[in-house]
Amino acid sequence: QVQLVESGGGLAQAGGSLRLSCAASGSIFSINAMGWYRQAPGKHREWVATLGSGGSTNYADSVKGRFIISRDNAKNMVYLQMNSLKPDDTAVYYCNILTSTLNVYWGQGTQVTVSS
């Protein structure tokens, strides 16, 4: 069993910054990739960023240049530094991991609200 717990969400003003954290625990033998998704009210969950096991990063066009994904392998942590926040970034943010056994796990989500 794998557990993911996000933290760091909250309220920010447009142009501000927030840093999200996600702690993974449980029976994790090897992680292929870690990522962040978000779901705004009335919308489908959308992909935000991914960090592969080799260090490669990919970002959705909507956040490219503003968000940075990083990880601490020793602590099984993944982070999302969010800069230059916009009201459109308001959503529940979820972290997920893809293990080497091709299992996918999700956290419970953390709310990010950006005021204009």
Image (cartoon, rainbow, N blue to C red):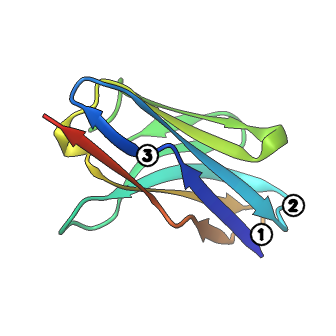
Q: Which numbered dot is residue 9? A: 3
Residue 94: x %, y % from top left: 47, 58
Q: Nearer the viewer, residue 34 or 108?
A: 108
User: Mark 2: which amino acid?
Assistant: Phe
Q: CA distance from mark 2 to mark 3?
A: 28 Å
Q: Tag 1's secondary structure?
A: loop
Residue 91 position (above or below residue 54): below
94 relative to 51 in the view: left or right: left
**Residue lying at 68% horizontally and 72% vertically, measured from the top left:** 103
Hey, which residue is sitting farthest front in the picture? 11
Provide the residue designation for mark 2. Answer: 29
Please report whichever mark, 2 or 3, sits nearer to the chain's N-terminal start: 3
Q: Tag 3's secondary structure?
A: loop
Please report whichever mark, 1 or 3, sits nearer to the chain's N-terminal start: 3
Query: Tags 1 and 2 in contact by the CB under 8 Å rule?
Result: yes
Q: Quadrant of the C terminus?
A: top left
Within-10-Å neighbours for mark 3: few <14, some 14–19, many 20+: some
Q: Quadrant of the N terminus?
A: bottom right
**Residue lying at 65% horizontally and 61% vertically, measured from the top left:** 4
User: Mark 1: which amino acid?
Assistant: Thr
**Residue lying at 38% horizontally and 44% vertically, measured from the top left:** 10
Please report whichever mark, 1 or 2, sits nearer to the chain's N-terminal start: 2
Provide the residue designation for mark 1. Answer: 101
User: Mark 3: which amino acid?
Assistant: Gly
